[in-house]
Image (cartoon, rainbow, N blue to C red):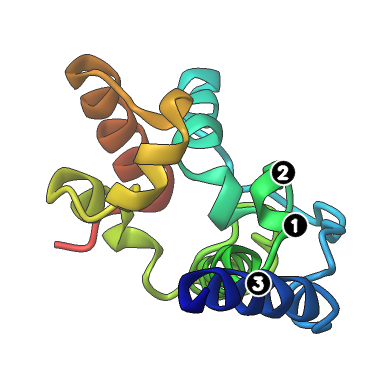
Amino acid sequence: MKVKMTLVGLFLAFLVIQWYPYAHDHKNPRVVAEPAWDSPITRELARRACFDCHSNETVWPVYARFAPVSWLVYHDVMEGREKLNFSEWNRPHKEAGKSADEIREGEMPMPLYLLMHSSAKLNAAEQQALISGLEKTLGTGK
């Protein structure tokens, strides 16, 4: 009986948090300006591996509509856009040159993101092409 009541309580808590307003806005702002990509290949690789968090072209997955996961996804996207936004290239991005290094070091895309987005997984050749293309497009952080 105690387990059943706990499960009912958890289910009710889950239902209640769905009405919490944080992270319900899944509208993407308009694309203002993109960098001058060195090639269409670099842009396509960046779109696959980076755009969901680092552009105004986020594809919001179904699970991003349900709290508490929606809170994490929304937070990660907002933070990603703040640090580097390929759709708002009209504003300064002082750490853009570090992008290639973060990919090279395995920091980006984030491992948790890769678990849920198989299309963002780049093979070794694609990863090297993206690193090289970002260095040419954005400069290097070294």
Task: Residue at 87%, 55% (x, y): give it.
Answer: 30
- The one nearer the camera, 54 or 15, is 15
- Above/below status of 112 relative to 137: below
- Above/below status of 112 relative to 124: below
- The one nearer the camera, 137 or 110, is 110
Residue under numbered circle 2: 62
Dot 2 or dot 3: first in sequence order is 3
Q: How many marks?
A: 3
Side of 116 relative to 8 (left or right): left
Dot 3 or dot 1: first in sequence order is 3
- Above/below status of 108 relative to 61: below
Q: Position of residue 129 (x, y in %)?
A: 29, 23
Q: Are marks 3 and 1 in contact (CB under 8 Å)?
A: no
Residue under numbered circle 3: 8
Q: Look at the numbered disc 2 and give the secondary structure of its residue.
A: helix
Q: Look at the numbered disc 1 and give the secondary structure of its residue.
A: helix
Q: Position of residue 59 (x, y in %)?
A: 70, 42
Mark 2 or 3: the one toward you: 3
Q: Quadrant of residue 118?
A: top left
Q: Are marks 2 and 3 in contact (CB under 8 Å)?
A: no
Q: Look at the numbered disc 3 and give the secondary structure of its residue.
A: helix
Residue 73 visible (yes or no)? yes
Q: Position of residue 99 (x, y in %)?
A: 32, 55
Q: Residues within 10 Å of mark 2 (few under 14, many from 20)?
A: few
Task: Residue at 84%, 61% (x, y): give it.
Answer: 29
Circle 2: residue type: Val
Side of 50 relative to 97 (left or right): right
Q: Are marks 1 and 2 in contact (CB under 8 Å)?
A: yes
Side of 94 relative to 88 (left or right): left
Q: Quadrant of residue 134?
A: top left
Residue under numbered circle 1: 65
Q: Position of residue 137 (x, y in %)?
A: 43, 42
